[in-house]
């Protein structure tokens, strides 16, 4: 971490991971390629779609490390000696440069699926529904030592 804290004067104890996430976010905020969409699908699902035309599945890597989602694209060497014939482009308008796109996910977001179709890499994310509240009934023990129900947990219907 840098000498100067993003979160200030040092009274944010235990938020080091938040600070690292903010530093990563500011470092990668200028990324502009490949273009992407983020959509909310229903109340508990998200979808991230990246335009990765020309990339094969073997040239893409999706890494989820804790709450950092990184999508990398690296073209294989088309002009390698084992290629059938070297390609000569008269005009090259389709980008084939490597990229790395970062997303920071909330602690409760999980990656469910990654699918490549028609030049679009679609990542399906979900947020599990929050747990239902539990109602606790408190009972007492009788004075003669007979055990009564000490704790009952019920869920609302």
Image: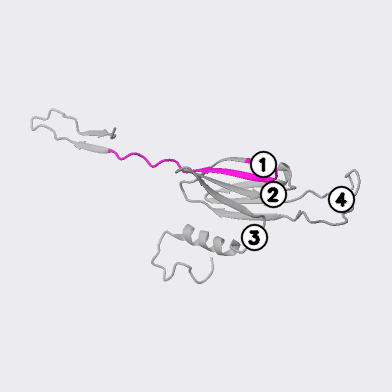
Q: Are marks 1 and 3 in contact (CB under 8 Å)?
A: no
For the residues labelled 4 and 1, the Cα–Cα distance comes to 24 Å
Q: Earlier in the sequence, mark 4 or mark 1?
A: 4
Residue 32 badge: 3
Percent across and percent down for residue 152 are 23, 33
Q: How many marks?
A: 4
Name the residue furthest left: 143
Give yes or no for residue 130 being in the magenta stretch. yes
Residue 52 badge: 2
Query: Could you say which is closer to the camera, residue 89 or residue 21?
Result: 89
Q: How many residues crowd around disc 2 within 10 Å: few (fewer than 14), some, or many (20 or more)?
A: many
Residue 79 badge: 4
Query: Which residue lies at the image location 79% right of the left edge and 56% below the top edge?
Result: 93
Q: Earlier in the sequence, mark 1 or mark 3?
A: 3
Query: Which residue lies at the image location 85% right of the left edge and 57% below the top edge?
Result: 91
Give yes or no for residue 70 being in the magenta stretch. no
Q: Are marks 2 and 1 in contact (CB under 8 Å)?
A: yes
Q: Mark 2 falls on what kind of element? A: loop
Q: Earlier in the sequence, mark 3 or mark 4?
A: 3
Query: Could you say which is closer to the camera, residue 61 or residue 147?
Result: 61
Q: Which residue is mark 1?
A: 116
């Amino acid at each position: 971490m840098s000498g100067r804290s993003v979160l200030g004067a040092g009274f944010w104890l235990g938020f080091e991971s938040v600070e690292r996430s903010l530093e990563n976010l500011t470092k990668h905020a200028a990324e502009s390629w490949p273009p992407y969409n983020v959509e909310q699908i229903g109340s508990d699902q998200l979808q991230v779609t990246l335009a990765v035309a020309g990339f094969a599945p073997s040239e893409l890597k999706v890494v989820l490390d804790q709450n950092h989602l990184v999508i990398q694209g690296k073209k294989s060497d088309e002009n390698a000696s084992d290629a059938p014939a070297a390609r000569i482009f008269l005009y090259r308008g389709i980008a084939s440069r490597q990229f790395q796109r970062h997303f920071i996910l909330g602690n409760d977001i999980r990656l469910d699926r990654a699918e490549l179709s028609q030049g679009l890499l679609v990542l399906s994310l979900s947020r599990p529904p929050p747990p239902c509240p539990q109602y606790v009934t408190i009972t007492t023990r009788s004075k003669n030592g007979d055990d009564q129900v000490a704790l009952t947990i019920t869920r609302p219907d």
